[in-house]
């Protein structure tokens, strides 16, 4: 699946979530049975988990992989951040999603720094 397709799929899930939430609001306003409201909340939870853990995680991991490749291309192997880059390259398949997002930001900072250094050469 291409990144654009994944983002399109994520938007579809978010749109579906919006509809589910609006449905729960109507159920509450209509004083529906609380067990039915609970069932709908569980459905929302399942959709949210799928959107976050499957789609968003996949998008973030691919984004990090692309950033690592760009940073490796910009770093000849002996740059100031070579150890950080190697760590990210080695560890990213096993990182928790929270760490993936943090490393993406770190790779962006390193890439900007390397771009400035490479401009001067």
Image (spheres, rainbow, N blue to C red):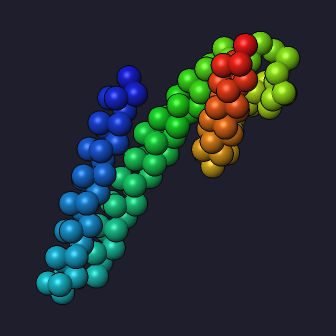
Q: Quadrant of the C terminus?
A: top right
Q: Position of residue 24 (x, y in %)?
A: 24, 72
Foreground: 40 or 75?
A: 75
x 81%, y 15%: residue = 77
Q: Is residue 87 visible?
A: no
Q: Residue furthest left?
A: 30
Vertical arrangement, residue 38 with respect to residue 121, above or below = below
- Quarter-wise, where is residue 41 in the image? bottom left
- Quarter-wise, where is residue 84 in the image? top right
Vertical arrangement, residue 17 with respect to residue 69, above or below = below
Q: Position of residue 40 (x, y in %)?
A: 29, 67
- Left or right of 76 in this view: 17: left
Q: Quadrant of the N terminus?
A: top left
Q: Say how many tags the image has.
A: 0
x 19%, y 68%: residue = 23
Q: Position of residue 56 (x, y in %)?
A: 46, 42
Vertical arrangement, residue 1 with respect to residue 28, above or below = above
- Left or right of 32 in this view: 64: right
- Left or right of 2 in this view: 21: left
Q: Position of residue 65 (x, y in %)?
A: 59, 25
x 22%, y 82%: residue = 28
x 62%, y 35%: residue = 108
- Left or right of 48 in this view: 85: right
Foreground: 105 or 34?
A: 105
Q: Is residue 49 visible?
A: yes
Q: Residue furthest front?
A: 120
């Amino acid at each position: 699946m291409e990144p654009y397709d994944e983002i399109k799929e994520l938007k579809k899930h978010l749109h579906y979530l919006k509809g589910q939430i609006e449905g729960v609001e109507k159920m509450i306003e209509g004083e529906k049975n609380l067990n039915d409201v609970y069932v709908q909340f569980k459905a929302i939870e399942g959709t949210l988990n799928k959107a976050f853990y499957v789609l968003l995680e996949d998008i973030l991991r691919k984004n990090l992989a692309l950033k690592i490749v760009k940073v490796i291309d910009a770093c000849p192997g002996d740059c100031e951040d070579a150890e950080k880059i190697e760590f990210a390259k080695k560890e990213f398949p096993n990182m928790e999603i929270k760490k993936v997002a943090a490393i993406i930001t770190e790779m962006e900072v390193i890439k900007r720094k390397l771009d400035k250094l490479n401009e001067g050469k």
